[in-house]
Every structure is written in structure tokens, then in C-alpha cells.
Amino acid sequence: MADSGNGSDGTFASAFAPFLTSDIGVMILLAIPLLHLVSKWEVRHSISLLLEFATTKVPTIDVKMTQAESDDDGVASKPDPTKKGELRDPDRKGMVQCYDPSTLQRLGEVPAMTKDDVDALCAKAAKAQKSWSKTTYAQRRLVLRTIQKYIVNHVEDICRVCTRDSGKPKVDALLGEVMTTCEKIRTINANGEDWLQRQYRPTGPMMMHKRAYVEYIPFGVLGVIAPWNYPFHNMLNHIISGLFSGNAVVSKASEHTSWSSDYFGRIVRAALVECGHDPDVVQTVTGFGEAGAALVNSSFVDKIIFTGSPGVGRLVMEGAAKNLKPVILELGGKDPMVFCDDVKIKDVVPWAMRGCFQNCGQNCCGVERLFVYESIVTEFIDTILPRVKELRQGIPLKTCGSDGDVDCGAMVMDSQMDHIQELVDDAVAKGAVLHCGGKRNEKLQGQFYIPTLLSGVTADMRISTEEVFGPIMCIVTVPNDDDKKCVELINSCSFGLGSSVYSASQKRGMAIGSQIRSGMFTVNDFGVNYLIQSLPFGGVGESGFDRFAGPEGLRACCLERSIVEDRIPGVRTTIPPPIDYPIDITKGLPFGDSLINLFYNESLLGKVMAIFGLIKNS
């Protein structure tokens, strides 16, 4: 019998050996010891989500589009080079004029809202939020899934509208606008409910009869002031987290990219209506500084989220301070990218190109400073210079005679190019080498600045410390391939948003990165922090404070409330007679002293003596 049993066991093991040694089998075996770490709630939640996604039909919405929104060549107006950056028309007071920065075609106009206009929208949002805050997480997920379904089925339409309003190539719109928004929705739908669950906290021995936790409840109305560099994502980003956390969201679109906000707002409102909710829970504000100030000061707005320049960020903070209104400030940066002497140049050049020139450099976490180690800097420049010169610049849509086949698009703000020119001229005057570019693209009538390569950039140049926000690659040589000196050069700047270090040794890269003062860091990669939406996004210093994205960002949309309740029914806190009013002058202090010693004296004898003291003074 024993032999038969052993033979049976051997047969069983032999039969399953191929599976157990397969990749899947090994993964399962490795996972089994970890299962006890997964809470029952997480298991139930995961199963519930799976069933919800498998059984709930996602509505399809139809959003009507204008000719200019649906066709690359759909704008009827002719290019007008005399209108560069002119958002105000004396004959059209109360309106914001909208132009395509690459073609200078007039796209239309949107209202320049007044304080009363903004307040009226905020009041509508506050009213709608009352019912929205009572929705379930499943209902909120369905709205976001409806938006996501529309995005996935209209990728090119959304990219086209982004391109038309901000001048970026469609691929830049796909990567920076559509992909990031889809990942935000996926992450929030998968994890948001978990992140907003009650967070139970230890009570300590004195309060062991209590249960303590933090709960996250909606603020009410979030006021968002969005920048112009990514009009779709910057608008949807906070709508996604705001709606999921039970808030209403009022977004102020930049006056430079207000035209597209109407289409993007129609998508969200259509999803809300289709799912049976009041679309007033999301509102869009257009206009100039007056409209932004009105949003900050509105009594209906409970929190402000601002993305933009440090100068305007300070004004927002000053305005919010009058009403003690909380703010989140994301104020840009001068992100460093480091290439140590042990990298393979051919492998890192594509990352330098992407980091500096994506979205024509109009990227808050774009690379503004390239720190290249001295022993490889000459080879690096020789390798990358032809790549920079080969960048194709022009109108990114198939319109006005362009085939749309470009790498680098237009600048959203014409005045930004004047600022860039000042920085480049200052650097050259102080000894930087201008290898290519360094001026407006006069061959094109739109708002274009030629992709530029500067080397020999030093700390005394303005371009080392001031945000460029344009297609400029600035190379700083790290003397003697010194890691310590590299860190000193990086941290001499007051911005601190993102950073990245490339090295053949990840250990070395991490060691350098650990000394960089920034809100985010990546080793041997660039930009992936933002595609991991479970991570918080934000910086330090001139880059602002607080976070969006991740559990920290979602919880930042909520009021944190500390809750204490009885753990055991009928067992409650009582006030001992010696310290109850009127206090027993003889026993009160000794009783309190004994109580403190009982819980906090680390000596066993001290605790025993404390018990006798409590008995004596009771």
C-alpha cells in the first residue's frame, strides 16, 4: 500500500511538473505566500469591479462637431499674420478672440466672462453637487467609462482639436493629451474607491475601547485654473478626480486655448446626461484674468487647483488667502536630465530629443537642462546636433498647403518667443555656444521658434534658472565627470518638479537622484512618472506645492475628517471622579500623575506603583 501511495504521489507530481515549472506556474507559486497580505476588502472589491465591468453596458454618446473640429482643413477663414497674439478685439468687447497659432486663422470667439458670470456658473455647480455627492462609486465610474469610450473612439478628432488650438503635432496630442487622460480614467476607476475608503488608525492603549478612522468627503466645488499647453488633458484631468470624489468642478480655460474647451466640455456634459445626472456639476469658465480672479474669490468655490507660472501662482495664493481657501499650485519647472560618463550615447539621444522637444518644449515637466559629463560631451553634441537640425517644423494639420508631416509645431503664445529670445541672447552674450536655431522661424508665418541647441551653458546665465517653455536644448557640462558637482549644479536652481538620471549603473543613478531636490525622479527613463497615475505629481520650491494624481491627489479633492466611535457597544469613556468638575483638589493631581505613569512609564515597577496610586486616589 505504501509503495502504491508513493507511486501515486509521484505520478501526481510528474503530471503537474510542466505546469509548476512554467512561467505562469512559478508566478502562482510565488503569489501564494503573498495572498495573506491582501485584505478581504481588496479581494471583494476586485471581484466586484470585475463583475461591474463585465456586466454593465457602457453608453455611447454622440457629440456634435463643427467643421473646424472634424476636418483638418475645416477652418474657412484665411490666415492673418497681423493678428499674432491679439486676443482682444476693440470691436468685440466682452469676447476672447481665438486663433490657430500655426496658421493664424481665426477660429471664433468665446465670452470673456465677468465676475457675475463666473459666480452664476459656480452657483449652478454648487447646486448640482448636492445630488452628485450622493451618487455611488459605480455610478461615477460609469460616467468616466462613458467618457473613456468616447475618447477611444474619437482619438483623431480630439488630437485634431488640440492641434488646432495649441499648434502641436497630432502625435504630441496623442501622447500628452489622450494617452495620459485615458490612463488617468483607468487608474481612478480601478483604484479610486480603495483610495477613498476609511483609513483606520491605531488608538493607543488609553483609548483601546474606541475605533478611530479618517474619512474623505467631497469639498464641494473645485475651482480649476488650467494652462494652455495641454488643453484637453489639463481640463479633463481635474474633472476626472473631482467627479470621482463627489465634487463639482468649475474649470477656467486659458484664454490662449479657449476655443477647444467648448468641445471638450460637451463630451463631459453628454456623458453626464446619458448616465442620468445633472450636467451642471461641470462648468467651463472662459475669459481673461478677471474671470480667473472671480473663480478664486467665489464664495461657492471650496478649493482652487492652479497650474501655471510662479508669478500668477502667487497672485492666486494671495487671492485665496483672503478667504482662507486651500490651494494646490503646480508652477512648472526646469527639469534636469543627467547623462553620466558610462552611458551609451546612441541610447540616450532619443530621450534627450523627446524630453526637450515634445510639444515644442511647452511642457511643465519637460527637460530644460541637460547635464552631460565632460568626457562624453563632445561626442554627445556631435551625435545629437544633426538630429536637432533635422527636426521638421511647420503647420501640423493638412491645411493651408501643409501636409501635416512635422515633428515640431507652433508656440501657443507669441509673446513667449520674445521671452525665449531674451534668454538665448543672454546665454550667447555670456559665452554659450549656439549650434543651431536661436530665432523665430521667419520662413513660416505662424508662431514658430526654430528648435535650438545651446552648449556651454553656465550658472550665471538667465537660461539656467528661468523657465524657458520652448524648443531649446541647453547642455551643461559636468566638469571632471564629478557626481557631487553634478548634484550641486542641479540644485542651484529654485525649481524642483521632475528629474532623471541615466547611467549604466542603476545604483549610481539612484545615488545621484536621491540628492536632487525635486518632487519626482526617474532613473534611466523620462516622463513615465505621469503615466503611472498612482504616483502623486508635483514639486517643491518655485515648482509649487501639494499634489494631484495618485491617492494623495484624489484625497486632496476631499475634506479629511477624523472620526472616533465606540468599538464595543455600551463601553464608553467616563470621567473619573477625582478629575471631574469640581475637581478634587486633594486627589485630582495624584490621580492624573498615576494615570500618566500607568500608560507611559516604561518601568514595570512604575506601572505597578501607578495602579496602586489610581486605587488610592479614586
Image (tube, helix red, strand yellow):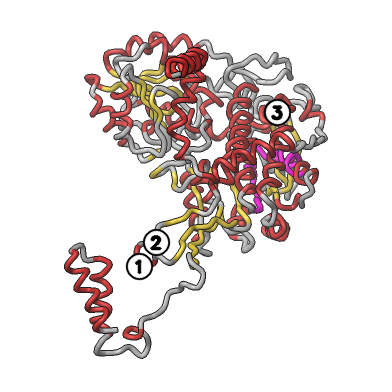
Relative depth, front residue between 421 and 349: 349
Marks 1, 3: nearer the viewer:
1
Q: Residues within 10 Å of mark 1 (few under 14, many from 20)?
A: few
Cα–Cα span, label 1 and label 3: 55 Å
Q: Is residue 542 above or below residue 1?
A: below
- Residue 428 visible within the image: no
The residue at which mark 3 appears reads as 152
Q: Are marks 2 and 1 in contact (CB under 8 Å)?
A: yes
Residue 611 image offset from top left, x and y in percent? 24, 74
Q: Are marks 3 and 2 in contact (CB under 8 Å)?
A: no
- By secondary structure, the bulk of the magenta-drawn segment is best described as helix
Sequence-earlier tag: 1 or 3: 3
Residue 503 image offset from top left, x and y in percent? 33, 19
Q: Residues within 10 Å of mark 2 (few under 14, many from 20)?
A: some
Q: Which mark is residue 206?
A: 1
Secondary structure of the residue carrying tag 1 is: helix
Range drawn in magenta: 247-269
The residue at which mark 2 appears reads as 203
| Residue type, label 1 | Met
Relative depth, front residue between 304 and 186: 186
